[in-house]
Image (tube, rainbow, N blue to C red):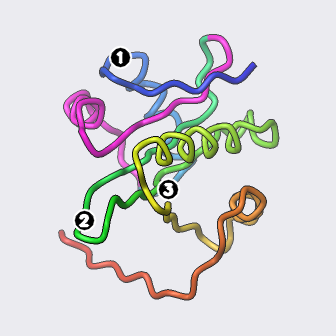
Amino acid sequence: MIEISEIHEADEVILSSVNHLLPQLSKSAKPMDEIQLKRLAESECTRLYFAKEGAEVLGMLSLVVFPIPTGIKAWIEDVVVDERARGKGVGKALMNKALEEARNLGTKSIDLTSRPSRESANKLYQAIGYQERETNVYRYRIS
């Protein structure tokens, strides 16, 4: 059975799990260190969720919730399911947990971005009820 839990403190096991999943999320992702993980675990805005089956970590998701003048905003970032666990409902369980938490925190909507090449992820988001928006997403890289 898949269990979703929020990470509240940093330890070696969690750090190892995050660093196992990050390269599956992005080839350019650099491994995290304990200080970075501690900052995430203690953040008021970011909630880091793990999907586990027993002691095995199957995936993770970040939910970022923050107030702005027009209300409370939420973003989902860094959704990744271990390649050995894909197609088993892990991503859906993570997404549903994030939706439940965002709803409990009073958000009006949740945004996320996904690469068009991630067909299975995009199908999952649409099946849950996310709708594609006509928008431009801009990025400025700070070196």
Q: Which label number is shown at residue 12?
A: 1
| Mark earlier in primary sequence (1, 3) | 1
| Mark earlier in primary sequence (1, 2) | 1
Residue 20 at x, y percent in the picture: 51, 33
Where does the magenta region start and end? 29-54
Q: Quadrant of residue 85?
A: top right
Amino acid type, residue under disc 2 in the picture: Ile
Residue 60: say if magenta: no
Residue 63 at x, y percent in the picture: 43, 47
Residue drawn at the location 75% of the way across and 66% of the way down? 119
Which quarter of the image is occupied by the N terminus?
top right
- Mark nearest the camera among 3 and 2 is 2
Q: Is residue 138 above or below residue 36?
A: below
Label 3's element?
Answer: loop
In the picture of the structure, the residue carrying the numbered disc 3 is 27
Q: Is residue 142 above or below residue 81?
A: below
In the picture of the structure, the residue carrying the numbered disc 2 is 68
Amino acid type, residue under disc 3 in the picture: Lys
| Mark earlier in primary sequence (3, 2) | 3
